[in-house]
Amino acid sequence: MANMTLNDVTVDIPIFGVSGRNAKGTLLRHLKRSVDYDTVWIRALDGVDFSLKDGDRIGLIGPNGAGKSTLLRVMGGILTPTAGYVQSEGEIATMFDLGLGMSYDATGRENIMIRGMLLGHSRDEMESKAAEIAAFADLGDRIDHPVRTYSSGMVARLSFSISTAIEPEILLLDEGIGTADAQFTARAKERLNEFMLRAGILVLASHSDAFLQEFCDQALVLDRGRVTFLGPVGAALRHYHASREAQ
């Protein structure tokens, strides 16, 4: 049974201080590793707590910079919290960085193998799924062209097709199909519905109220890294829009 728990998760991200960001500071760092400069820390997530279980469909709501993408990366194991912890059971597939695990000089067909194996699947398993993935991505002959020749929509189609073909128990999605064409987006929604029928966990970050209401029953509202609301998606959207109007 898939599940995930985040306990008091905090993420601090270091950035250079003013002296470290200017041209002189940059040159000095290259010339002398021991140069001292101030470091500014940004708190991207601040004490985030919640749990998910099989069948949960939760949306992440918030303006740009609220911490949605950081939270997804922590849940996907890409970022390590500064404090707190994440515990999970179940295979996780991420779709919030379309280039993650992609070799842009390799063909789409080769990337099915590369990305699938990076996600922890065997060559035999990916070979057995390659034809189905290629068909769903609907790239035609372009499947045998280098990915660097693809449009962003084509990369989205291939990435989504690989991520969902492996039938993960936990799917983390950050509007990844938003750059694909309308016809593919419709098929992708069908595939997401099929995934949810298998009682997995879906975490979806989106700026689209309609998209969130279609796929999520709960939602978490983030503001500058802190959770300001967690509850039914309709109530969460009302809370978010009211807070934005009050600013």
Image (tube, rainbow, N blue to C red):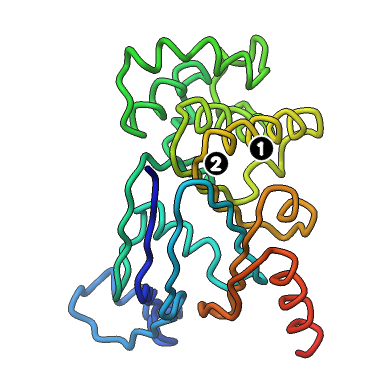
In the displayed structure, does residue 131 sit left or right of residue 117?
Answer: right
User: Which residue is pictured at 46% across the width and 75% down the height?
Assistant: 44
Check whether the beta carbons of the residues at disc 1 and disc 2 lie within 8 A of each other: yes
Number of other residues with Cα within 10 Å of mark 2, as a class: few under 14, some 14 to 19, many 20 or more: some
Q: Residue at x 51, y 27 (%)?
A: 162
Task: Give SS at disc 2.
Answer: loop
Q: Is residue 119 left or right of residue 180?
A: left
Marking on residue 98: 2
Q: Where residue 205 appears, x then y in whole percent?
A: 61, 57
Quarter containing the N terminus: top left
Residue at 52% in and 39% down: 199
The residue sitting at the left extreme is 34
Q: Of residues 208 and 90, which is closer to you in this image?
A: 90
Where is residue 10, by image quadrant?
bottom left
Q: CA distance from mark 1 to mark 2?
A: 8 Å
Q: Does 137 sit above or below residue 177?
A: above
| Kind of residue sitting beneath label 1 | Ser
In the rendered structure, which amino acid carries the disc numbered 2?
Leu
Side of 8 relative to 36 (left or right): right
Q: Badge 1 is on which residue?
A: 152
Viewer-nearest of labels 1 and 2? 2
SS class of the residue under badge 1? helix
Q: Residue at x 47, y 30 (%)?
A: 167
Residue 22 vs residue 9, the one in the foreground: 9
Image position, residue 211 (x, y; %): 74, 51
Please tell me how crowded label 1 is: few (under 14), some (14-19), or many (20+) other residues with Cα within 10 Å: some
Instruction: Give the image location of residue 113, x and y in percent.
Output: 40, 20
- Establish if 53 lies above or below 81: above
Look at the picture and state if 118 lies above or below 142.
Answer: below
Instruction: Please report whichever mark, 1 or 2, sits nearer to the chain's N-terminal start.
Output: 2
